[in-house]
Image: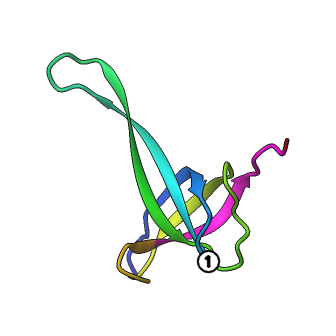
Amino acid sequence: MSVKSQLTGTVVSDTMEKTVVVAVERQVRHPLYGKSQRKTSTFMAHNEHNEAKIGDTVVIAESRPLSRRKRWVVTRVVARAQEI
């Protein structure tokens, strides 16, 4: 079995049932000028028991296609968001 890739990101939306939107940030250097830039990618991830909420830091792992845009699964919640 192949190794599944894992990413760490922040939950941006949890309005859907059993699905969260996770924003993953990475740093990329500009090819010509060399300045570091922050790029953000968003992934739809399966959240079976609705344990991840907005602002939580989560680890997501690759999986089989679960729907048209969902190809990731939340494996664990690293840090909870601070409640106000």
Please state, as top left, top right, bottom left or bottom right, where the C terminus lies in the image: top right
Q: What is the x, y in percent for residue 62? A: 44, 70
Seen from this angle, which residue lies furthest right? 84
As for residue 73 lying within the magenta part, the answer is: yes
In the displayed structure image, the side of residue 13 where residue 41 appears, left or right: left
Question: Which residue is disc 1 drawn over?
Answer: 17
Q: Which residues are magenta?
A: 72-83
Please state, as top left, top right, bottom left or bottom right, where the N terminus lies in the image: bottom left
As for residue 74 lying within the magenta part, the answer is: yes
- Callout 1 environment at 10 Å: few (<14), some (14 to 19), or many (20+)? few
Q: Is residue 78 above or below residue 71?
A: above
Q: How is the image coloured?
A: rainbow
Q: What is the x, y in percent for residue 72? A: 47, 70
In the image, what residue occupies the spot 70% across and 73% down? 50
In the image, what residue occupies the spot 19% across and 16% down? 33
In the image, what residue occupies the spot 71% across and 78% down? 49
Q: Is residue 35 above or below residue 64?
A: above
Judging depth in this view, the residue of 55 and 7 nearest the camera is: 55
Q: Secondary structure at mark 1?
A: loop
Secondary structure mostly seen in the magenta stretch: strand
Specify the amino acid type for callout 1: Glu
In the image, what residue occupies the spot 43% across and 63% down? 5
